[in-house]
Image (cartoon, rainbow, N blue to C red):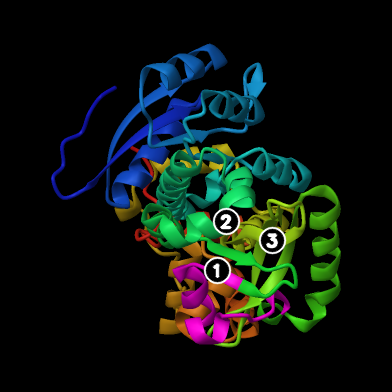
Amino acid sequence: MDHEQLNDRIPLAVLMVEDSDDDSRLNQLELRRGGFAVSTARVQTLAEVREQLQAERWDIVLTDHALPGFSSAEVLDIINMTGQDTPCIIVSGAIGEDAAVRLLQSGAIDYVNKSRLGRLVPAVSRALEEAADRRARKQAEASLRELNENLEQRVAERTREVLSQSRLLEVAVNTMKDVFYVTDPDLRLVRWNRELRSVSGQTDERLENLSLAGLFHEEDQPDLQAWVSSVREEGSATTELRLRNKDGVYIPYELNGAWLQAENGEPDGICGIAHNVTGRRQIEYRLKEAIRAVIQDATWFAQSVLDKMNQVDAENVPLRPGIELTDRETDVLERLAMGARNDQIASELGISYSTVRNYVARLYEKLGVHSRAEAVVWARERGFGQGGSDVLP
């Protein structure tokens, strides 16, 4: 790897699975522009992917979707087999919605279209944060497992003794970012952690003997009862319910629980963990929205257009004679050249979506172009959009 020493930047080791040297360099350039000190290796075969993952510790993997002889799905398989929990982002051209959803389910953190590299830095930053959170959670869970060897079995056998005597368990439970809870056979809370107090805004006095059902949305009560029945019948079960937070907002949580039994075999309640899945839902929503945009928008840049833009000397291309743009038209054209969608332009300029659409239509007429792609090329050739993604010389 070639290492970059920049004191004021965030070190980032990137494994680049990419058969295009130009695309690899564009990815690196975008990351450097986002404040990262990038050290990278570019690989083009599955054997090289496996070799690099075994030889080095990478902060993140950026992979194209369709490569000669294999796809990003096989790259994800190799990452999963290493057990290193290295986050992976798909950086590719347009892909189908079904394929994108399958990649997300297989472990991909996000999908960034090559024509929208402005999303790369936020996606990488989010992936690194989520990886750090996972490591912290795993460390807490490892401490809990080290103390108990088998949390479910140990809690079932010695719940009251462990919860009353083990200070280490108390610390471990309270460092978890997930909600931890224990109920009695009537589903009243008898034990909980700091996270439940923080999320619900309830004091220990109000939580004591509170029914588990009192934490969740009224419409979710049938699902809660079905989950309780599954826990009793199968020993453990998982469901998703909406938990009311301290602001009165209902947040989706994945509820895991195991049925406890007393030493005499009598039912003793439920012990489990509830995990906030809002982030996962947001990622899935953003991915689906991005896929819909890819499917609906037929104006993605062709590679030949990008090559032409790379060769343009903006200072030597004059404005078309007789074209006069208003300040607002100039603002819209600047953001259009940076690759912004109409809704993003409307948000940035504080105007309505329909107003932006009208400005874009007038720009087409003034510039003598017939599509968004032509307008962007026209603008980039004349120096607009320099605040967007850089291109290599």
Closer to the chain start, of discs 2 and 1, is: 2
- Residue 216 appears in the figure: yes
Disc 3 versus disc 1: distance between alpha carbons?
10 Å
Closer to the chain start, of discs 2 and 3, is: 2
Image coordinates for residue 132, horizontal then vertical, percent: 40, 48
List the residue tagged with mark 3. 270
Dot 3: element: strand
Closer to the chain start, of discs 3 and 1, is: 1
Please state which of residues 98 and 208 is positioned toward the viewer in this rendering: 208
Image coordinates for residue 361, horizontal then vertical, percent: 63, 75
List the residue tagged with mark 1. 191
Q: Quadrant of the C terminus?
A: top left
Residue occupying image coordinates x 52% and y 72%: 196
Dot 2: element: helix
Task: Check the image and name the residue furthest to the left.
Answer: 7
The residue under label 1 is which amino acid type? Arg
Please state which of residues 367 and 147 is positioned toward the viewer in this rendering: 147
List the residue tagged with mark 2. 159
The residue under label 2 is which amino acid type? Thr
Q: Depth-wise, is mark 2 or mark 3 nearer the camera?
A: 2
The quadrant holding residue 92 is top right
The quadrant holding residue 135 is top left
Magenta region: 190-213
